[in-house]
Image: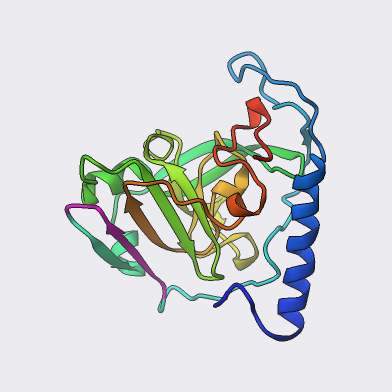
Amino acid sequence: MSEKAPGLVGRVKDKLVESKQKWAREGRLLTGETADPAAQRLPPGQRIVKDWPVLDLGLKPRIGPDTWQLTVDGMVKNPITWSWADFQSQPQVQSVSDIHCVTAWSRYDNEWEGVSARHLLSVVQPLPEVRHIVFHAHDGYTTNLPLEAFDDDDVLLATKWAGKPLSADHGGPVRAVVPKLYFWKSAKWVKRLEFVAEDRPGFWEVRGYHNEADPWKEERYG
């Protein structure tokens, strides 16, 4: 699906993107504060919510497990293409982490289940020169991540939230979960992970948002 989707959906998406880019230009929501995550659970400028707001580009791909595939390629020793059955046959892990959205809401204690990033790394074996990963999603979205941010014990490709399969609204059947960064780095509807040597900023990163996205440094915009 192209970034310039036709018709009403495309117009809605363009309006949303224009609004978010304006936020970046104006530095909206910035407090100018920083915090130590070891001492303060809630990052600067965030508020706690109990629900889970739905945010996307105005496109909601509907991908069933029977057609879903995950490709991991680029600079790896063992590129893979997993079907849903292949993915489910991998070791499944459970974790609990917080969500911090750049739009200033945070949600505590989210229960995830899926395949850990470290297991995936052990399977594909990135080449020594790899420094970054690019996530590709079914709606055309991309986002970039340093390899060391992906190689963390709380990062996973999630299929379940709160004990239930991820809904399509929240990125099901599989989304990335990178809890230490603003949640736009946790791509929904993941279909491909590309391992690269050079950084390649993604959809929001080239539209005024910060390349690193550390909530405690309030790296909302770049």
- Residue range of the region highlighted in magenta in the rendering: 68-77
User: Left or right: 90 with respect to 133?
Assistant: left
User: Left or right: 16 with respect to 89?
Assistant: right
Query: Does the magenta run of residues contain 69?
Result: yes
x then y, percent, for residue 155: 44, 40
At 77% from the left edge and 61% from the top edge, which residue is drawn?
18
At 38% from the left edge and 34% from the top edge, which residue is drawn?
148
Q: Quadrant of the N terminus?
A: bottom right
Give the camera-side residue of 213 and 108. 213
Q: Quadrant of the C terminus?
A: top right
Which residue ends up furthest to the left in the rendered image?
77
The secondary structure that most of the magenta stretch takes on is strand
x then y, percent, for residue 21: 74, 54
Is residue 162 something that shows in the picture?
no
Position of residue 44 relative to residue 18, above or below, is above
User: Left or right: 141 with respect to 28?
Assistant: left
x then y, percent, for residue 199: 42, 46
Position of residue 209 relative to residue 55, above or below, is above
